[in-house]
Amino acid sequence: MSEKLTSKQMSKKITDEYMDEAFHAHENGKLIGYSTAISPVELFVAHDIIPIYPENHAVANLTAKKGAELCSVVEGMGYTSHLCAYARSDLAYRKTGITVTKGIPEPDLFLACNAQCFTLTKWFQVLARKGNLPVFVFDTPEYVMDKKTREEIVKYCVLQLKELIGFLEEVTKRKFDYDRLKEVMKLSAESSILYRKFLDMAQYKPSPISIFDALIGMAIAVYRRGTQECVDYYQTLCDEIQAKVDQGIGVLPKEKEKYRLYWENLPVWFKFSDHAKLLGSYGGVILTSLYVHAWSFEFNLDKDPLVTLAENYVSRFSNSTIEDRADMAAELFKKYSMNGMIMFMNRSCKAVSFAVPTLKEILTKRTGIPALVFESDMGDQRFYSETQIRTRIEAYFETLDRLQFEDTQ
Amino acid sequence: MWDNLTIREAVEYAKDPYPSIRKWIKDKGKKVVGSTFADVPEEVIYAFGFLPVTIMGTNKPLKKAPSHLPDNACSLARSNLELVLSYEGDLFDGFVLPQVCDTTQHLSDIWRINFPDKYVESYLAPRQADRPSARYWVKEEITRVISSLSDWSGRKIADKDLWEAIEVHNENKNLLKEIYEIKKKNPSSLTNKELFALMKLSQQVDKAELNQSLKKIKESLRYEQNDEYTNVILVGITCDPPEIYDLFDESKLNIVGDTLLVGTRYIQGIVPTNGNPVDALTERHFRRGFFSPIHDNVYKNFEEVKTLYKETKAKAIIYVHIEFCESQEYDLPDLKRMIRDEGILMHTLDTEYQTLSLSHVRTRLQAFFESLKGGSL
């Protein structure tokens, strides 16, 4: 990797090469494994299976406002309008070929980890039925708060990872290489540390990054972790952001950065830049969310790789209790000095959204910060009410302004 | 209280079992441990001397649940939450709540946060069922729930307690099975509504008592064949409200097979009686069809339904879809296609808990039923 490339150039190069390799996988004797975004993909990388994330492809289409068109198609196929927009748009892509990218290669096998949600598992099963392909479900029971139960859960997950290795060996007819896994884990651990360092730069005032930068910067952590290029990318990204910090450059100028906001849930992909501009006009910057932190793993390389993999994947925010999620979010509030929160009830993501009302209650009580709650869909524009949401955002900032004014009196 | 019920009384109790449960616990001085679908081994709760009650929604208005769960959440989940938040929460001393899908996972958390003074334990059901680790996990979870109940109650149970509980539960399932068999061959012996009321009540009241009623009810049934009836299969999780069964009964449709949790999947859960009780309860988990549709393998479902259809000489399949059950919704288009490709008539009934008006269901079902009997749609 040339040192002269910027992080943006590196990201494009890594992505292009990755997709090119994926589209020619079979010519090179490799298999394509569809994976959920949160899953122990290190095992795929160590076993030379190319991971492909249908979610990422769905995000590209949804961000490009293809959601309503694709989701309408899938409803004609007999699926209901309240399923995940990633799944709906993907199933419609399979039928119509509509995509804003070059599409994604067809799978040979599936790895579905339910630490993220169970909907992905069902979606993958639908895809697997079409091609009569093997699916491995890595079941991660909720990481409940009791310590002893957690130990039992990790044991169960380690057993399953061993089964996954057996599954991969059976599908590929190749023996798994544990030494190679250790190398991959080392790279994954390094990039995770750098990725977290990048996210944590939002602590600076003014913040040099918003959540929109974090979401763009997140992609490589999702699909290339476990590789040297992923480590190099985050090193470059961190260096670039540090340079901004050193020069005092923020998303908003220091004097304009009034509200440092927390975002709950996935973004409304098709409103990505509109939201950044709208919030910025009120002096608001969304700094972070638990969602972007989902890939900042803390692998312990002194442990058996399967144990540290199990511990990390089972404990993602989406698989934690609401109380633990509240603790994780409260820690971010403190660390990033946040003074506002936007809670998005996402019709497409029940796994994250069903916790939102309770989470909002706990967080407002603990932080004393009022919350803006709005309901919409991350990808299907038919569930987005422009005027209503804009009005709510305006009203929210008026409330924050009033509270700030009262505080200064 | 439940040991001498007529079939008419059983239907009434099944519609709203809570007043009788209140009276019973007052008389007996026992604790009530609630649970929702699915897979929680109720025998374990029973062995501790508690009354296990499966919570199956309420027909009363939703007041508090919508502020916790949005309107695109599974209607059964919302209805169950409402029942405990607004109406019957005080009845329960504790809960063992199964986690089988994304919705039930959150429901457990919400439940625990809203009932800080009650015992709330999760039962982390495996969400993969075909590998050895699933069996390992079920055994671990049963053992953990026993230990948790023991900590809460301050008492220990012996194998003997578990075997006694298993015996009562097995007897209950065997009796229901026998009554179902009589009804299949003698459709006028009892109505569909009555049969499924017995299945529901069995999961909510003391089985040792109810078994006495079931024995008497079984003996009272009339054994006569009746050719006026048309056989059908009912597929799904549950069928609610129970008035839907009236529509079947009015049209002389005889349900001769089903895959419901408040039906065959429940009575399939007879526990083997050899070895040690925890192993036996684990084994049961894998012998019967899993309760949650999260495990559903469409091919397996299709084969199960097709076999039922052929063996029972049924004329159609009625699929009950509970609104906003994602697991069903991902599988249904493929299952429908497979069933229709086989040339089997299938009708999908969309329903949700809190349904008060059945007029749309009635019209669609009647049209379908008429076509079954030789009319046209």
Image (cartoon, grey):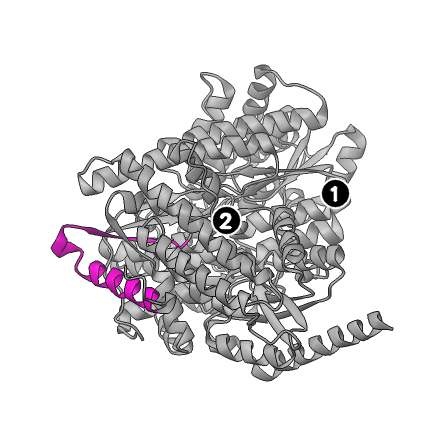
Specify the amino acid type for callout 1. Pro
Disc nearer the start of the sequence (1/2): 2
Specify the amino acid type for callout 2. Cys
Determine the secondary structure under disc 1: loop
**For this view, does A239 lie left or right of residue A150?**
left
Taking depth in this image into account, of A360 and B91 the one nearest to the observer is: A360
Disc assigned to residue B101: 2
The location of residue A25, given as percent across then percent down, is: 18, 56
Is residue A27 part of the magenta span, yes or no?
yes
Local crowd size for mark 2, using a 10 Å CA cut-off: few (<14), some (14–19), many (≥20): many
Chain under disc 1? B
Q: Residue at coordinates 79% horizontally, 29% vertically from top-left?
A: B29
Determine the secondary structure under disc 2: loop
Is residue B195 part of the magenta span, yes or no?
no
Residue extending farthest right? A409
Q: Are marks 1 and 2 on the same chain?
A: yes
Chain under disc 2? B
- Label 1, on which residue? B116
The location of residue B276, given as percent across then percent down, is: 48, 17
Q: Which one is in front in this view, the residue at disc 1 or the one at disc 2?
A: 1
Disc assigned to residue A13: none
* Magenta span: chief secondary structure: helix
Q: Is residue B236 visible?
A: no
Q: Looking at the figure, which quarter contains the N terminus of chain A?
A: bottom left
**For this view, does A179 lie left or right of residue A281?**
left
